[in-house]
Image (spheres, rainbow, N blue to C red):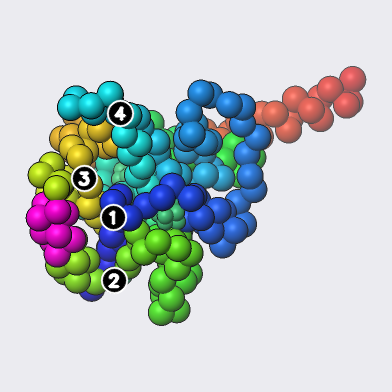
Amino acid sequence: MRKSILYDASKCTACRACQVACKQWNQLPAEKTSFQGTYENPPQFSSTTWTKIAFREHAEAESDRVKWLFSKQGCMHCTDAACIKVCPASAIQRNEFGAVVVDQDKCIGCNYCVANCTYNVVGFDQEANVAKKCTFCYDRISAGLQPACVTTCPTGALSYGDRSEMIALANKRLRHLQDNGNPNANIYGLEELDGLGVLYVLEEEPEKYGLLENPKVSTRANIWNVIFKPVRAIVVLAMFFALWINKGESKKQDEDRIAT
Ligand code: SF4
Ligand code: SF4
Ligand code: SF4
């Protein structure tokens, strides 16, 4: 049964409790940042920041007021997932809940998913040499709990459940918003990349929130998938072999240096 997270931007106050809950549950340390002239912080995703509240300002045409638009962003758990397509080690898979997850034991640190993710949300842990991103809280949902970010949200902007239930909830909220002075309200994530695991109820067009209007897996990622998928095992073996040879050479050079 595919699960989804529904984020309702019209209920979000940008308190960032979800951001903190993600860090706390997953034991991700805080990052030191400097002020960039925006409420959005940290400025980008990393191996220790898997979700964050994007912040945009928009001048309203009919008045001289500025409107603040918030959106919780992170891995979208795309159906057409570029990261799965490009991973040469098959370390990124879709699990039984429909979430896209990185198996850290299989990751060879090639960085391809970081470079090709459609939403640019994958971080790279230089020390451990592995890619890291939102896990959809697999450890929690497989135990019957909700994701940490959803549990924490104090305004009810986040919901979690069967995808069909989340779509019904999104449609109900959309009708309410449209009937109450929000003609531009829309749902994001139903069609994008054949359906996202994270759905959005928005009051304005997606691009005003910094969301891609028409996301696509890059041609480069699709070509890589078609050409290299059949020989993936050989590519991985060749990479491991090269690393092994390299290690052996370094060891020999060290021994020669000590002997002389
Ligand atoms: S948002 Fe990026 S990392 Fe997440 S499933 Fe889509 S392509 Fe993969
Ligand atoms: S689902 Fe879990 S890992 Fe993903 S953003 Fe929410 S708290 Fe973080
Ligand atoms: S916890 Fe809820 S209200 Fe606060 S920023 Fe996250 S989604 Fe918005």
Q: Secondary structure at mark 2?
A: strand
| Highlighted magenta segment, given as a residue range | 171-180
Query: What separation in Å lies between label 2 and label 3 (alpha carbons)?
Result: 22 Å
First in sequence, mark 2 or 3: give its number.
2
Amino acid on which the number 4 mark rests in the picture: Arg
The answer for how far apart the CA atoms under marks 2 and 1 are is 14 Å
Residue at the disc numbered 4: 65
Q: Amino acid at mark 2?
A: Gly
Secondary structure category for the residue under label 1: strand
Label 4 vs 2, first from the N-terminus: 4
Q: Which residue type carries mark 3?
A: Glu
**Picture disc at residue 203:** 3
Residue 210 placement (x, y as % from top left): 30, 33
- Mark positioned earlier in the residue sequence (1 or 4): 1
The image position of residue 75, as x and y in percent, is 36, 48
Give percent across and percent down for residue 28. Answer: 60, 51
Badge 3: residue crowd in 10 Å (few <14, some 14–19, many ≥20): many
Q: Which residue is mark 1?
A: 8
Residue at image point 53% right, 36% down: 42
Separation of residues labelled 1 and 3 (CA atoms): 9 Å
**Magenta span: chief secondary structure:** helix
Amino acid carrying mark 1 in the image: Asp
**Residue 252 occupies quadrant:** top right
Residue 161 disc label? 2
N-terminal label among 3 and 4: 4
Q: CA distance from mark 1 to mark 4?
A: 23 Å
Within 10 Å of disc 1 (Cα), the crowding (few <14, some 14-19, many 20+) is many
The residue drawn where x is 47% and y is 55% is: 18
Rendered residue at 75%/25% (across/down)? 253
- Can residue 40 be seen at all in this image of the molecule? yes
State the CA–CA distance, disc 4 to disc 2. Answer: 37 Å
Query: Which dot, 2 or 3, sits closer to the camera?
Result: 3
